[in-house]
Image: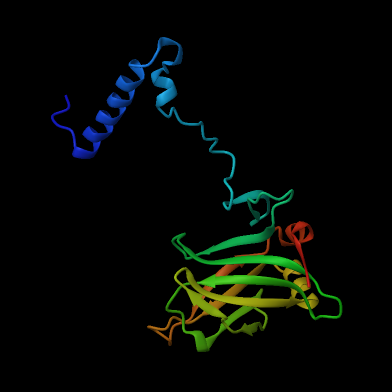
Amino acid sequence: MIKSLTPFTLAALLAVSSSLSAQESTTEQTEPTADQILDLGQPVDSGTPQLGERYSKETHGDWDLACVKTDAETDPCSLLQILTDPEGNPMAEVSLFRIDQPGGQAVAGATIIVPLETLLPAALTISVDGAPGKRYNYSFCTPLGCIAQIGLTQADVDTFKAGGEATLSLRPAPAPDQLIEMKMSLKGFTAGFNVVDVVQQ
């Protein structure tokens, strides 16, 4: 049983009632039905990505070919992996794409998002299968996290293709003496890299 109506709900009901009453005063030929006055809504297909929404087009091992829905014929895609802590909580995001840059060293690029309060001067280190790695500077921070925009040479890509697991290392600003290591699986990297978008430079 409804005990009372809020002023907003009551006003809405009165508006609909007034509209129906006004329509009743017109001729029978032009009298609309309640279905014509009230918005019955449109079905939403939960399986269809909405404009601007990111979706997984296909998977390659532990990598997703993640695309963004646009109104163009083809959607832009990148190779995506979410890195987690030992409890399975998301810690970082790696989004990778190929680069067509005649004469340039970088054959691929990646955007890596790590948590806020990361110690920026310590930079981000990436190594593969325990071998000596490379250090990359952070570009900027947003409310979503701190971002490193890195370039990968052909040698870097070949190392990823031949490797089994990469390690991303950073230091938190509140505890700079601690080293946080996140594992990035390279399973499926080669197959995913071969189909990911190429950015023209």
Number of numbered discs on residues: 0
Measured from the top left, where is residue 179 in percent x and y? 48, 81
Q: Nearer the viewer, residue 114 or 35?
A: 35
Q: Is residue 119 left or right of residue 55?
A: left
Q: Nearer the viewer, residue 18 or 44?
A: 18
Instruction: Examine the image and state in which quarter residue 38 appears.
Output: top left
Q: Nearer the viewer, residue 54 or 87?
A: 54
Q: Is residue 172 left or right of residue 153?
A: left
Taking the spot 18% from the left edge, 33% from the top edge, the residue there is: 5
Taking the spot 50% from the left edge, 31% from the top edge, the residue there is: 42
Q: Is residue 56 left or right of residue 159?
A: left
Measured from the top left, where is residue 165 in percent x and y? 65, 68
- Where 93 sits versus 135, above or below? above
User: Which of the image's four quarters has the N terminus?
Assistant: top left
Measured from the top left, where is residue 103 in percent x and y? 86, 80
- Where 188 sits versus 125, above or below? above
User: Which of the image's four quarters has the C terminus?
Assistant: bottom right
Measured from the top left, where is residue 166 in percent x and y? 64, 71
